[in-house]
Amino acid sequence: MIIQAYLDRIGYGGTLEVSLEVLRSLHEHHLCNVPFENVAIWYGEGVSMDAPMVYHKVVEKQRGGFCYELNLLFHQLLGELGFTSSIVAARVFNTEGELGPPFDHLFLLVELDQLWLVDVGFGDLFLQPIAMHEAIIQTDGRNYFKVEKYAQEEYLLLMSSDKTTFERKYTFSITPRRPSDFALMCQEKQTNPTSHFVKNKICTRVTPDGRMTVFNDKFIHKMGEQKVEYLIEGEEHCKEILKSHFNIVFE
């Protein structure tokens, strides 16, 4: 990994001291510049958890990815910069409120003054790390979040737009995991016909005023309280949108 190339990819030019301020800035820069997307699955390229291949895809080819790629790569960057980071597993709630399988999602815990949840590979979630603290409601400036005890060795992450009604996002354990623990589920996500990532086209990233998203045949741009939405007219139109709004270019 060439650290400066990765920092350039996420548009970060600040100090590199091991601190919460730097972690927050790295996290938000990552979300603003590297899209959460499954483009490789759409076009049959395949998704790998091999670290050099993920680095080549995200940093050198200027692409995005999903949790098994983006959080894995960010974990390596944080380690290179001197942060104490560990990989952990989560189970994601779907739109029907059903809980996904073990190793459904890969994200990170970073140890500073306390443990911090770090996740640059979920899509629409927190912009800045969330403290592993059960007693408070936290905000990233756009939404509100809570961490609650879920089971004997599991916790629950909840999100709200109004600080009143909270939606369950995922359950997780703080037990450190290895990348190889997620290999079978990573393969399942990109090959099983019932997988959310096989059934749907997804590409999304944070913007200064909201979020841009491709979801199947729609392009959605949220700007504060406003939302612009229009139909995508075929594959060529989709590729134009990916290029102009997400800097994804097909060779």
Image (cartoon, helix red, strand yellow):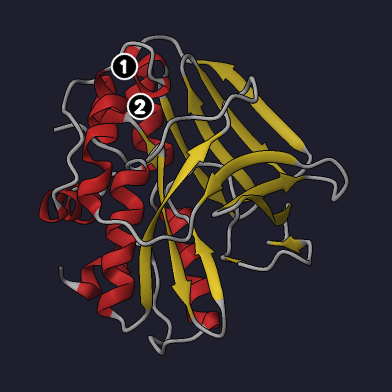
Q: In the drawing, what numbered circle is on residue 236? A: 1
Name the residue furthest right: 164
Q: Amino acid at mark 1?
A: Glu
Q: Amino acid at mark 2?
A: Glu
Q: In the drawing, what numbered circle is on residue 111? A: none
Q: CA distance from mark 2 to mark 1?
A: 6 Å
In this view, the residue in front, 107 or 124, is: 107
Left or right of 189 on screen, residue 123: right
Q: Position of residue 83 (x, y in %)?
A: 37, 80
Left or right of 1 on screen, residue 177: right
Q: At 30% across and 81% down in the image, what residue appears?
A: 81
Q: At 32% across and 41% down in the image, what residue appears?
A: 65
Q: At 59% across and 47% down in the image, what residue appears?
A: 125
Residue behind mark 2:
240
Q: Is residue 130 above or below residue 115?
A: above
Q: Position of residue 74 (x, y in %)?
A: 33, 62
Would you say the residues marked 2 and 1 are in contact, meaning their CB atoms lie under 8 Å apart?
yes
Left or right of 185 on screen, residue 14: right
Left or right of 12 on screen, residue 229: right
Number of marks in picture: 2
Q: Quadrant of the C terminus?
A: top left
Task: Check disc 1 and report its element: helix, strand or loop.
Answer: helix
